[in-house]
Image (spheres, rainbow, N blue to C red):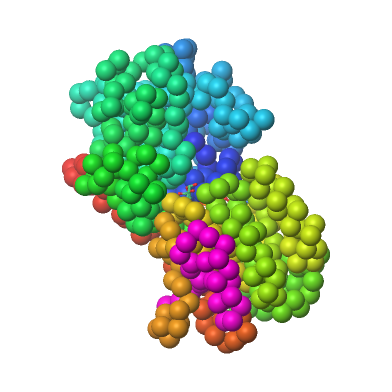
Amino acid sequence: MRVLYVSTEVHPALKTGGLADVNAALPAALAHAGADVRLLLPAFPALKAAAEPTGTAVGVKCPPAAGTVEFLPCRLGGIAGWLVDAPALYARPGNPYVGPDGSDWPDNARRFATLGWAAARFADGGIGHWRADIVHCHDWHAALAPAYLRARGGALPGTVFTIHNLGFQGSFPPDQFAGLGLPAHFFAMHGVEFHGSLNFMKAGIHYADRVTTVSPTYAQEIQTVAHGFGMDGLLRSRAGALTGILNGVDTAAWNPARDAALPAPFAPGLLEGKAVCRERLRAEFGLARAPGGPLIGVVSRLTAQKGLDLLLDALPAVLAIGGQIVMLGSGEPALEARWADAARTHPGTVAVRQGYDEALAHRIFGGADMVAVPSRFEPCGLTQMYGLLYGALPLARRTGGLADTVRDATAAARAAGRANGFLFEAASADDLAAALHRAGALWREPAAWRLVQDVGMRERFGWADAASRYMDVYRDLRPAA
Ligand code: ADP
Ligand code: GLC
């Protein structure tokens, strides 16, 4: 089964969020499950620097790039593939989607149409002498590949489009369609048009043979008005082709027993190291020692999606249970300012580090007693899984992948040995505060707390399960490959 895996970011070379973690682990898991996986990514400077060239570049004229693109054969993170080089579009350091001022690059439609075009052009084997059975595209950036393939016609590979976040759709003014080299009739309701705009996400959902998303609950939620971002009707119409496959955790990178970023290792049942991590984290952030309640960690983008404004609104409940917060994140300036304010108002109790810091993220999961993920929506979410494995009980909203990975510490779930964290229902500070009070009560019963923690630390979120589910999707499309 030859799978062309088309995306934009790969940890550790280039990461803006969980997509990079997925792309660093899923291709290897697919290879392990028997697929011949090849990566196709834009030649962003960070990816180019990390890739090991393996052959000679091949240049091809590319209409959406309004010039030539080069396919650079390489290996990246141990996986073979090609970088699509078009310096006028991709030779920009930093975040792959936005410029230094934080706003989208004005030519994003052209930049990511070029990626989709390149995938479609490459898949037939004419360029790299490797023909794809399946083209697997991730998020809106790669979503035009199935449209370009459909436009080409003839014997085509199967196409799979994975939605990692329906909130980012790649929507552009209609006049940007003209330069992309797609047939004019594709700009239609049954095509790439969405309420008068050009919409990459829509194209992926419409043209791909199969659509997947990153948790079973999110696969249901996106078919509702509340979570569909306007695409719910289209997604309902494609329900028969839509599956939710839960992401895994790369345990080579996320294992508290072998994590070089932690001051001390620990494991289920062996928690002395975790106590060291907690005290070091408190010291690093100038938090009071022995506060009487749990240390709550947050590692997150600061956007409305993540609901961290709710945690600020519920701060009185954190204080009431003797809790502390360490927050590592960056994003919307208004949220950054509110968090900075909270840290100023509550020194020794609330500590904030703005920015992006991979090693500190590990230290936070290692040292925290809880990890807060109060998301308004969460396609999968990885930090609650990292928290679970690192003995930090998730405090999460029951939505998307959070609902699929966190089991609330009700009396019944605890008695059954299933509880691994705390869930709340509504996206409100009141519901979050109520869950905090329940956490505070459990904290006062250390033995009961440790049981819940132990359940979490022993969870298995290996990528093998997800890979075998993706293989089923591929085989369903190409039984003979
Ligand atoms: P999303 O992709 O929506 O941001 P996920 O939970 O899937 O959410 O993935 C987020 C990833 O980014 C995790 O690996 C998390 O540890 C990491 N992360 C988020 N913010 C930061 C930060 N400020 N510093 C370091 N890592 C971060
Ligand atoms: C997106 C989602 C997140 C998911 C990640 C990887 O960024 O917001 O929930 O875990 O993709 O699939």
Q: Tell me where residue 348 appears, x and y as whole percent.
A: 80, 66
Q: Tell me where residue 144 appears, x and y as whole percent.
A: 37, 28
Which residue: 51% across, 71% down?
422
Which residue: 45% across, 25% down?
172
* Vertical order, 25 against 298 (above or below): above
262 relative position to 128: left or right: right
Viewer-closest of 134 and 179: 179
Q: Is residue 303 visible?
A: yes
Count of numbered tags: 0
Which residue: 35% across, 29% down?
194
Q: Is residue 419 magenta?
A: yes
Viewer-closest of 453 and 266: 453
Which residue: 32% across, 53% down?
220
305 relative position to 157: left or right: right
Q: Quadrant of the C terminus?
A: top left
* Among the 4 quarters of the image, the one containing residue 318: bottom right
Q: Quadrant of the N terminus?
A: top left
Q: Is residue 60 visible?
A: no
Q: Residue furthest left?
A: 480
* Among the 4 quarters of the image, the one containing residue 136: top left
Q: Tell me where residue 442 appears, x and y as whole percent.
A: 57, 81
Q: Tell me where residue 430 appears, x and y as whole percent.
A: 55, 66
Viewer-closest of 423 and 179: 423
* Vertical order, 131 against 62 (above or below): below
Q: Is residue 94 magenta?
A: no
The residues colored magenta run 418-442
